[in-house]
Amino acid sequence: MNTSKPSDSFARRYQRYRPVIEYVTGETEVDLQMAQAACRPESPAFVTRVVNELAKQGWLIREGSASAFRWNRDKGDFKSNAWLDQKLFGTQIKAGPQNERPRERLLAVGAAELSTSELIAILIRSGRPGESAVMAGQKIAKAFDNKLDRLPAAGRGELKSISVAVEKTAYCQIMAGIELGRRITASQNSKAVTKITGSDDAISFCQSHFRRLIVDAKHEEFHIVTLDTKNQVIDTHQITVGTLDASLVHPRKVFRAAIKDTASSIILAHNHPSGDPTPSREDIAVTDRLTEAGKIIGIDVLDHIVLAKQNCVSIRSSR
């Protein structure tokens, strides 16, 4: 009994068709025997079938012999991805639920090949009567076309007004997917910064790693960046959420995280949701208090970066 899943079948078919299509689209004139040799270990019969199918559809025109073809430019540009989609998934659209197609495509060709609407449809997962997840994904993708960076800040009511399929669960899945992607990107970017030698490096790192705080955080958050003896980033830690107050940012909590990382020094960072990066008196007081505490412990406070939409400011450099 065949127990393989439909997605496995699509993946296998894709792996067979793709090399043949890539070869023929790279040739101005297609020689069948050369195509068969180039596409090994695929069987010659399968390569012949694909080439003949392209000829039957009018994409290829026979040139004299039975094994020579040229592209029919009068038919327009041949879109290999579109052809593969139609070939592999055309039946799936009619035979199965529409909202399952993006998942099948992801398993077969990978997430990078999917459109924005398909990725959103997968996150939505299931539609509502009269509106599938695919339709919902298309509506949201269209609404945020050329402004996808605004999607993380969209509220549930806003997305619900675009598509009735965005119920509470779907909204949570979309936001969770966005946040996970952002954290992965921040982690990758932070690894690219191997050493912080001054305020410019500190600002650059914090702008990248704490982008969420700059773009859409509604409350102040206080974080630290821990560094080793070579000023290389070890890790980051959230210390407090809420209005920055010297009484709340206790040295014990700040330096507990630094000691745990065996840090030699730290950088302080917090955001101003107002958008104005100008350091307040409280910001400076927190900086001074933690700097003095660090001297006693033996962990230097190298800088304090204020993050805001207008700009990012180093308190060390601004004094």
Image (cartoon, rainbow, N blue to C red):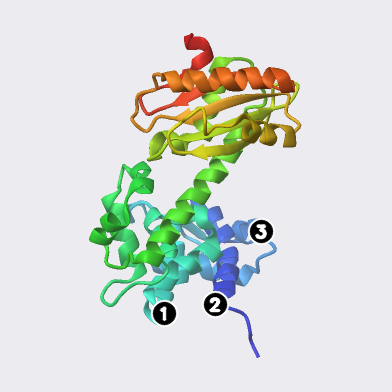
Q: Are marks 1 and 3 in contact (CB under 8 Å)?
A: no
Q: Residue at x 67, y 36 (%)?
A: 257
Residue 237 is left or right of residue 143, and the answer is right
Residue 211 in picture, x, y percent from top left = 47, 35
Query: Gap in Å between the C-alphas at discs 2 and 1?
Result: 11 Å
Which SS class for mark 3? helix
Which mark is nearer the camera, 2 or 3?
2
Label 2 packing within 10 angstroms: few (<14), some (14-19), many (20+): few
- The label shown at residue 96 is 1
Residue at image mark 2: 6
Query: Gap in Å between the C-alphas at discs 2 and 3?
Result: 30 Å
Identified by mark 3, the residue type is: Ala
Which is more toward the observer, 13 or 273? 273
Residue at image mark 3: 37
Identified by mark 2, the residue type is: Pro
Which mark is nearer the camera, 1 or 3?
1
Q: Are marks 2 and 1 in contact (CB under 8 Å)?
A: yes
Instruction: Classify 307 as above or below 316.
Output: below
Identified by mark 1, the residue type is: Gly
